[in-house]
Amino acid sequence: MNGPEVKENGALPLSGPFRLDASKYARIFAQRRTVYGRTLAMWVTRGTDAGRQAGVVVSKKTFRRAVDRNRAKRLLREAFRLSRHRLAPDVDVILIARAGIAGKRCQEVMRDLEALYVRAKVTDRPADADRSERR
């Protein structure tokens, strides 16, 4: 089969170019720039080699069952995929699931993620520009 695998609901998975390389995790964690939300924590870095990529971390300590860990990872990846266009082009993030993500829907996680983008000041354009475009 050629091309990306399409899921039953028609959604495309977060493909390779959008996933963070394992070598970049240490660099992002070393910068210690973190923003916390209700459902996730976000570590952020800016750089010339960054390119709107995300890494996802889900702790076994927080989510004991593999089913819960996998659901949290899927929610984080999908929320990032849907809101990735709001990030500045020189930003990479690591998303860490918090216990509050349990039982949440993708829209709720995406709202929390976009709020973290604004708090971390890594959006491509200000929130006021988004509001004026909707009118």
Image (tube, grey):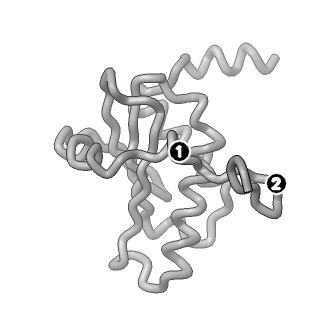
Q: Which residue shows up at 41% across the image and 50% down it?
A: 55
Q: Which residue shows up at 35% across the image and 43% down it?
A: 35
Q: Quadrant of the C terminus?
A: top right
- Report whether residue 101 is seen: yes
Residue type at numbered disc 2: Gly
Secondary structure found at label 2: loop
Secondary structure found at label 1: helix
In the rendered image, residue 46, in percent from the top left (x then y), is placed at 32, 27
Q: Say left or right for 73 vs 60.
A: right
For label 2, the residue is: 10
Q: Which residue shows up at 43% across the image and 64% down it?
A: 98
| First in sequence: mark 1 vs mark 2 | 2
Q: Quadrant of the N terminus?
A: bottom right
Q: Residue furthest front?
A: 1
Q: Say left or right for 42 vs 106.
A: left
Q: Say left or right for 134 vs 3.
A: right
Q: Which mark is residue 113?
A: 1
* Label 1 CA crowd tier, 10 Å (few <14, some 14–19, many 20+): many
Q: Which residue shows up at 61% across the image and 38% down it?
A: 83
In the rendered image, residue 103, in percent from the top left (x then y), is placed at 62, 71
Is residue 67 placed above or below 108 in the rendered structure? below
Residue type at numbered disc 1: Leu
In the rendered image, residue 119, in percent from the top left (x then y), is placed at 43, 33
* Label 2 CA crowd tier, 10 Å (few <14, some 14–19, many 20+): few
Which quadrant holds residue 128?
top right
Q: Residue furthest bottom?
A: 65
- Report whether residue 107 is seen: no
